[in-house]
Each structure stands twice: as C-alpha cells, then as structure tokens.
Image (cartoon, grey):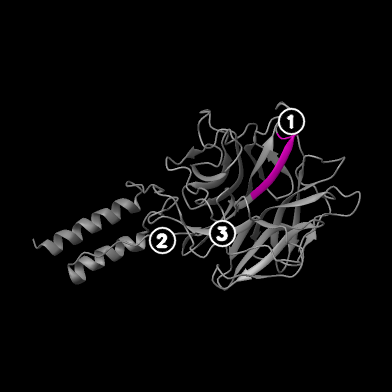
Amino acid sequence: MSSSIKAALVLAVILFALSLGTLPVTFAAEAEWTKYSGNPILTPTPGSWDAGSVSTPRVLYDGRIFRMWYEGGNATTTGIGYANSTDGIIWRKYPSPILLPGPAGAWDTSAVVLGSVFWNGTLFLMWYSGSSPVAFPNGAFGLATSPDGITWTKYSGNPVLKPSAIDRKYMTDPDVISMNLTYNMWYVGRSASDPASSEITRILYATSLNGITWTKWPSPVLTPSIDPNSWDSASVYSPFVVFDGSLFGMWFSALSQSLAGARIGFAKSPDGATWTRSLSNPILSPGPTGSWDSASVDKPGVSVVIGYMLYYDGFSNTTRSAIGLARAPEGFAIPEFPVTTSIVLLGFLVISATYAAHPRKIRKKSIA
C-alpha cells in the first residue's frame, strides 16, 4: 500500500472517530493575548459627554459592521454610549449618550452601568445596572430594548433583578446569553454577610425563561483565589461569557490583595455553574511603565469574528480610562466543534478520488 493511501486511511479513521466524539478537542490558552499595536482604539473625546473616560466595551458584529456600546462620562454626566466600525479598530462615535440615568425618583436615577447587549433577531436587548439613593443604593438590574442599537426603551417593570442576601451589599456587571430557550446571567455581587469595609466581589449566576423573571443560583460560581499571593485573591468581577457548542468560556477581571493593577483571566465550564480557571492566567496584564494601560486592564468584552477579539479598558497613572484590543493566541478555542458527518464523507471521497491526505476542517460557531 502506498504512503499516500495509508495517509488517507489514517485521516479517514481520525475523522470518523471525531464524528463519534471519541477524540475530544480541548481548549488551548497557553499564552497571553497579543495587544494591538495601535491601542487605544477608543479614547475620551475632549469637550464631549465622555471627556472623562470610556470603558466597559461590549461589541457585536452583524456581518457588515461592528457595533460597540460603552460607558462614558465627564464631571457632570455619566451614561452609556455607542460607536460603530467597519473593521473593529477604527470607530465612529454617536455624538450623545444612548442611555442615561432615570429622572428623580426613578430606581436608576443615580447611575446606569453597562452590562451586556445582544440581538434576538428582532430587537437589541440590554441588561444594565442602575442605582438610586434610597431604594437601590447598591444596585439592581434593568432591561432595555432597541430596534437599532441607538434608541432605547427601558422596560416599564424595571428593575428585573433586585438584591437579596447573596448580593445585597453590591450588584453590578450583568452579562447575559440566550441558549436552549433559557437566558443565562453571570453578574457581580457582594453578600449581606460581608464586612462593611470589605472590597471582595464574587461572580454569581441566575437563569430566566423570558429575560425578566430570574432565579438566582444559591451560591457564587466564581470566587477569589484562596491563595493570598494570587493575582485574583481579593476580587473577581466583570464576567463576559460565550458558549461554543461544548463548553462555556468566561473572561473576567480580578484584583490581588493590593487592590491595584487589575488583570484579565479566563475560565471554562461544562454547565455555566462549575468553573475551572486557565493555568495560563492572567491572560492579559497591564503594559510596561509609560504605556497607556500600565496601571490596569479590565472589563473584557469578546467578539468572535475571525478569531477572538478581546476588547478591554485600561489606564495609566497619567491617562484616563480608554479602550484597547487584544487578539487570541494561535489555537485558542472553547473548544473547537467536533467534525461533522459531512466532513467524514469528504474524507472517504478523498480516498477514492485522489488517494491523498487532506487536512481536516473544524467548524466553529460564534456567539452573538
């Protein structure tokens, strides 16, 4: 038997085994992500409503343009802004905030903090955190909808998630994905039992059938490391989650006991509730002295287009918060999908037609 036929037969066996799920493919995250050399890609605009800072990027790609929602503010205004881009790097801002705190007496009169945005086929949906001096001083979550990503209507029944014992002292950063007819939310909280002076935050979990009525998981799903010397020993926050067919992947921010120099880590989960941190953490760290993000990197938001594009905010001791971009290391997946039956058949066609080996193809699914 010729070497080419042997190679093709080996390929066919591998493809068939993969189609049966006997050779699982695991995720690879064995290197730090690569920061774009032209960072930052979005900065405060002098004299504008976001002259003070821009942060918390949330990016969707619709096949034509990238859309970004972000937090911004100046000395008198804070809100949520919008920008779009054709390449994910050069952005054009909408001139004014697209979501602002509510009027006096509203549940979100003090602040609105961006959580997550996705398109359900008809509308954009945004879950966000809001607060007010009396009713919700430590936060609650609201829902807003939009036909175009710019003009938003707050749900009349807000807030859709209110504090309870597990998150009474602080709740923020809701991140939501929809799958299998269920809405899944990961968010940040501090419990009623934490000391008043505590800065600890944990990542919590809730589910819903309609995005409005939520059931909280009874305990945190990601907590600070028990190792006091670890980079994530004081606080974990700002989760961003995708589901890629087999596993959930979460990017999150964390602080060490010094409470300075936030970094970004990654974890995986089979069910959204039990998480395993990457051995490569942190996957993104502050830049060298003198760089725009030398003091902190946090609040990741990931867009899956051609590879993984990680948007994050950072700042230095001399610059205000701005938004940067990093790309995944080669081979990163969460995990890759198994090879489909059609590719198995293709392998056998290759054997009969050409007697030559052909590299297998892996089909990936992006989460919007």
The secondary structure type at the circle numbered 3 is: strand
Q: Are marks 1 and 2 in contact (CB under 8 Å)?
A: no
Residue 194 falls left or right of residue 64: right
Q: In which quarter of the image is residue 11?
A: bottom left
Residue 236 falls left or right of residue 79: left
Residue 298 image offset from top left, x and y in percent: 59, 49
Which circle's residue, 1 or 3, is located before the other in the chain? 1
Q: Is residue 56 above or below residue 186?
A: below
Q: In which quarter of the image is residue 121?
A: bottom right
The rendered magenta stretch, by its main secondary structure, is classed as strand
Distance (Cα) linking label 1 and label 3: 36 Å
Label for residue 165?
Answer: 1
The span shown in magenta is 167-175
Residue 13 seen in render: yes
Q: What residue type is labelled 3?
A: Gly
Crowdedness near tag 3: few (<14), some (14–19) or many (≥20) residues, C-alpha within 10 Å: many
Question: Which residue lies under the disc numbered 3?
Answer: 324
Crowdedness near tag 2: few (<14), some (14–19) or many (≥20) residues, C-alpha within 10 Å: few
Question: Which residue lies under the disc numbered 2?
Answer: 363
The one nearer the camera, 182 or 150, is: 150
State which quarter of the image contains the N terminus. bottom left
Which circle's residue, 2 or 3, is located before the other in the chain? 3
The one nearer the camera, 299 or 129, is: 299
